[in-house]
Amino acid sequence: MTRNRLPNLIIPGVMKGGTTSLAATLELHPDVFLIAIKEPNFFAQRPQSREKLYQLLSPDSSTYKSVTPHQTTDYLEQEVYEEAFALGEGTRWRADASTMYLPSPDAVRLAAELVPDAKFVTVLRNPYSRAYSAYQYQRSRLREPAPTFAQAIQEERDGKRDDWAYGWRYLHTSLYADQVERLFEAVPEANRLTVLMEEIVGEGGLDPVYDFLGLEDHRIDLVFENETLLPRGRLKQFAAKMVNNPRIGRPIRAILPQSAIAFYRRVNAVIRGAVYKDGEKPAKITDAERALIATEVEVDIDRLEQLLGRDLSIWRA
């Protein structure tokens, strides 16, 4: 194992929780390195994990009526994972920002075991907003079979999504208490920082993160990335369906050499940008939709307040 070919900064997050924006902002600092694939999800699919990401399911992007294996296999092997960080060997912080790490039952622990001196920075977003935003994100990718948020939540409560990837388990992923408790058990207090998305937005909001990482210069405010937009018109909706179809993307990645993966993803990002340009912003969560998950979320916020030792009424309003 080559120590400086492993990440020493882990940003374990949840989908639509602010992880991408934080990582994109930190990457602009000369002392921070991110690999070409921002979310390798390496620690969420280790052989030691009880629940491996690549064995979970996701909606079939062509039929919407069945599920297919949710495979994220670019970094299954540790040798490949280490090699991806080779370009950042001389950088102070080498970051892995994966949104599947926090809800995974083992990812954070496995990361702490492999890189015990790593720092962990976690962003938590209002659980109501996060759940609804994740639902709308999957709708924008045309990969959410439930026509309403209410139906998606009911399917989850009925156990129909128990073996689905976390990106489609909106309630499960928004209940942070168990996830944070696992983080606290695995990582010493000196090596972890937990911040709220609502507090790092705006001038100077990222200062606690910069201070924690000892980054003095080149501080900038949070840069928003990965905004959810719904494609307008049938042509762009069809294009979105193609660009988001794993049955197209996976075979292409499978035949490309590792050195070409970054270029392929950049091209894919340009195409996505054109497809979603001038797209429609989804509506914000309504009081009725908040009420659908309030029972579980309010209890979880109570627990999280105890774990964090702070007031989270900002989420209850």
Image (cartoon, rainbow, N blue to C red):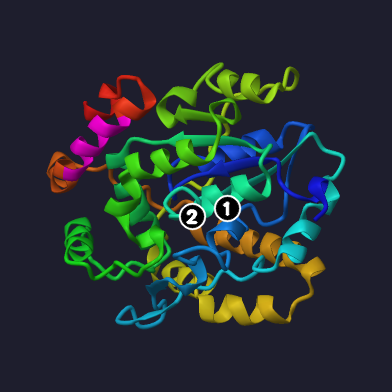
Q: Which residue is mark 1?
A: 110
Report the amino acid beneath label 2: Asp
At label 2, counting other C-alpha atoms closer than 10 Å, the crowd grade (few under 14, some 14-19, many 20 or more) is many
Q: Amino acid at mark 1?
A: Leu
Tell me the quadrant of the picture where the C terminus can be found.
top left
Which residue is drawn at the image coordinates 49% and 67% (left, top)? Answer: 52
Residue 240 percent coordinates (x, y) = 47, 68
User: Vertical placement of 304 versus 161: above or below?
Assistant: above
Q: Main secondary structure of the magenta part?
A: helix
Q: In percent of the image, x 19 and y 44: which residue is there?
A: 296
In this view, the residue in front, 214 or 269, is: 214
Image: magenta residue range: 296-304
Q: Is residue 162 magenta?
A: no
Q: Taking 109 as reference, is 178 left or right?
A: left
Q: Is residue 53 above or below residue 28?
A: below
- Asked which quadrant contains residue 11, the reply is top right
The residue where tag 2 is placed is 106
Residue 237 horizontal/vertical position (percent): 42, 69
